[in-house]
Structure formats: structure tokens, C-alpha cells
Amino acid sequence: MNRFKFTLFFATLILFSCNKEEQYAEVSAEELHASVDQVTNIMVHDIFSPPVASRIYAYANVAAYEIVAQSSSNYNSLAGQLNGLDSIPKPKRTSHLNYRMSALIAHIEISQYLIFSEDKMIQYKDSLYSNWKKTNSQEFESSMAYATEVVDHIKSWMDKDNYKQTRTMPKFTVQSDNPERWQPTPPSYMDGIEPHWDKIRPFIMDTASQFRPIPPPEFSMEKGSKFHDELMEVYTIKNKMVEDGDESEELQIAQFWDCNPYVSVTRGHLMFATKKITPGGHWMGITKIASKKAAADFEESVYAYTKTSLAIADGFISCWEEKYRSNLVRPETLITKYIDENWAPVLQTPPFPEYSSGHSVISGAAAKALTHIFGENFSFSDDTEVIYGLPVREFQSFNHAAQEAAMSRMYGGIHYRSAVEVGMDQGAKLGDYLVNTLKMKNSKDPIAAN
């Protein structure tokens, strides 16, 4: 009897140990959102320019998405769809492999490779990885091994996009004797940012000029000309906003969509910077908001981030091709020189040419992608800017948000109307092209309808 009891106890102990070892980690959409937020926070700290930030989001999201597509019949690989991307390797072994874990690891590792403050990402991931390893070490090691293979594959593809070559190209030459060409603006008078971004390999576009917009209005300081009328509109709007004070709706919109990653502030002899998210970071925040409202699972959220970030990344390439081609002067330069030397825009003028409006282009593109993912008339509360002391704004659709983001540039005094309206059209055309070209999700139903 005692021998029987001992045998039963020993068998139960073995069974319990096996069950404990076979526990698996739950990798949820919430962990994905937290990791994207961590990347955004680090990029704010590191002060990445909007185009460079968009590249980081896109590559990290594609890395995660390709693993999702490997494990789910509902999603198609982007190999052969994105320029230069070949199929990622298949896992050498599937025993104990957690595809969600591999996808999130790939997202984190690519992000860490592209940011500056690696220590901040290392601290974040070490805590996450440690928990996974404690839950099931075999699962973690297997998932990490596969993620590493995919990361190496994505890095090889990424390193051929001409980014490294553009780091050694010359600065932009300012035509200081030509009044219609862009001039550096106060307070920092910075050089033009990323003048060679048009040489970055696009993700889906054939060339950077594929969606080149119509030319801006012909430069003229004569009263009654279209260009002069648009210049005076910027001047007049700012003055009216000052009269209306903090209750001005235009002022609130301008501040909400500022998204300037580096604002120089001068106090006496001291100059310092205030940091914010980039326009792309704001739209990544909106993607999170929509995903959570739609109760999107991990795979659906990866899909949403990927499609939206691709629209944004190519939007910046398209826009920057036009910016440094048309090389148009900013309103602030002309107004302070010819109209009112004491005038200043509500928003700090960013350091690159005026036409077309970058925020307008990428907002138009992102809105098209998100509408395709979540459906028309998807209302949401945008709390992305709350951490910067701004209130939540309500939107009835992604297009509603995009329209407001675009107009914020004119309200802020940094763009003419044409740059805003044409920029939105430029982005919308790119967004339509992305939606109609990329075959990502087999189900045509919006996530919100699931």
C-alpha cells in the first residue's frame, strides 16, 4: 500500500511538472501597442526628423507582419509586393514556436537597431523577455531564434534602401539671392532637413515622383495674384486668431496637430528644445486608438500598424521629392520681410521648403489606409496629445482628422492654402494606390465589423 501511494505521488509530481513546463506565454495586442508606444517615446527623446521616424516605424512593422503572414492564412506576405523584399526564411523548427512572440521580438529588435538610445529599448525588452523566459524557456528560445533569422533578413533588405548613402550627401544649398526660394527661418535658422530623401527606395511607389503634385501658384508679390492672396490669407488668419485668444478654434487645431519633434525656445541668452511626436507618430497613435476601439487582436493590430506606416513612409518620400524640387519660400520669410517685421507664426516654421505640406500628404495617405482597415465613418477620440498638455479631440472619421491636420498647417502660419489642399490630394492618391496595390488581408471586411 505504501509502495502504491509512493508511485502515485511520484507520477502526480511528474505530471504536475510537465504541465507547468508546458505553460505558454500570452502575447496580446496590448503588448504590441506598448512596444510601439515605447518606440515612439524613444524617438521623441532622440529627436528624429519626421521622414526618418517614418522609416523606423515601417521597417519594424513589416518585420512583425511578415511573421504574422507566415503563421496565418488570413494574411499574405509582402514579399514581391514591397520593392526589393524577398520571402523571409521559414522556421527551421516549429516545436515550441510562438509566432506572436517572434513577431513582437522582431518588431523590438528592428526598432532597437534603428534608434539612438538603445539602452532605453534594452531596459524595456529585458523585462519583457525575462517574463517570457520564466513562463516557458523553450518557447522563448525557439521564438527568439526564429525572430533573429527574420530580423537579419529584414536588415539585409533595409540596408539596400540608400539611407546610408544619403548620410554622406552634401547639405542643401540655399539660394539666398532668390526671394521665391526657401530660406532658413528663426529662431535656429537650421539647414534644410533631409534634402536627399527622394533617393530613399520607396516601399510601394515605383519612383519618388510617381505622385508628384501640380506646381504651386506662380510666385508673385503683386496684389491680386493667387500667390499673394494666399500669403495674405496666412497673415490675416494669424491676426484673427490673436484677437480671438485661447477660444480660437483655429488656434486649438494648430496646436493639437503641431507634431514638431524639435521646437527651439529662446529665454534670454538660453536656448533649449521642447520635444514632441512627429506627424507619423501621431498617426501611429491614432492606429492604436482605432485598434483598441475595434477590439483588434494581435494579428489585426500588426496589420493595421503595417499598412498605415507604409502609407506614411512613402508619403514622406513623395512629399520630400516635391519640397526640394519646387523649393518654395515659407510664409514667415515673406511676411516679416515685406509686410510686418514683428509677425510670427503660431507654430514654429520647420526647417525645409514649403510645398507641399508634409503633414497634409501623410495624413491623406494614412486616412485612406485606416479607412480601408476599419471602415468609413469610424469615429474616435484622439488623446494622442494629452501627454503634451492638450485636450482630447473628437473625430467622426479618419478623413475628418486628416482634413483638420492639413488645415492646421495654414492656421499655424507655416503653409499656404495650396500646399495644404494639394498635399491632401497628393496623399489621398498615394493612399488609394496603396490600398488597391497591396494584397495583405484576405478578408475584405473592415476590422471594426468583426
Image (tube, rainbow, N blue to C red):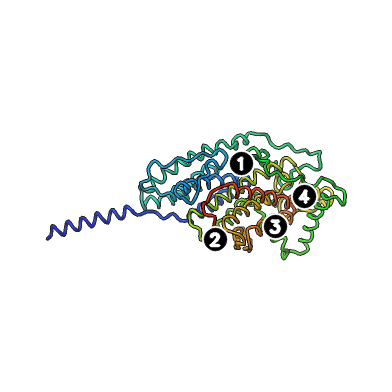
Q: Which residue is mark 4?
A: 332
Q: Residues within 10 Å of mark 2 (few under 14, many from 20)?
A: some
Mark pair 2, 3: CA separation: 30 Å
The residue mark sitting in front, 2 or 4, is 2
| Labels 2 and 3: the sequence-earlier one | 3
Disc 2 and disc 3 in contact, CB within 8 angstroms: no
Could you say which is closer to the camera, residue 279 or residue 208? 208
Cα gap from disc 3 to disc 1, whole angstroms: 30 Å
Residue 394, placed above or below residue 307? below
Query: At 77% from the left edge and 49% from the top edge, which residue is drawn?
Result: 332
Q: Is residue 235 left or right of residue 49?
A: right
Q: Are marks 2 and 1 in contact (CB under 8 Å)?
A: no
Are discs 3 and 1 less than 8 Å apart at CB? no
Q: Is residue 345 left or right of residue 200?
A: right
For disc 1, the marked residue is 202
Residue 448's disc is 2
Question: Quick one: SS at disc 1?
Answer: loop
Which of the two residues, 291 or 111, is positioned nearer the viewer here?
291
Could you tell me if residue 55 is visible in this image? yes
Residue 125: percent from left, percent from top = 46, 49
Under mark 1, the amino acid is Pro
Residue type indicated by callout 4: Glu
Numbered disc 3: secondary structure: helix
Q: Report the amino acid beneath label 3.
A: Ala
**Residue 210 x %, y %:** 67, 42
Per the model, the C-alpha gap separating discs 2 and 1 is 29 Å
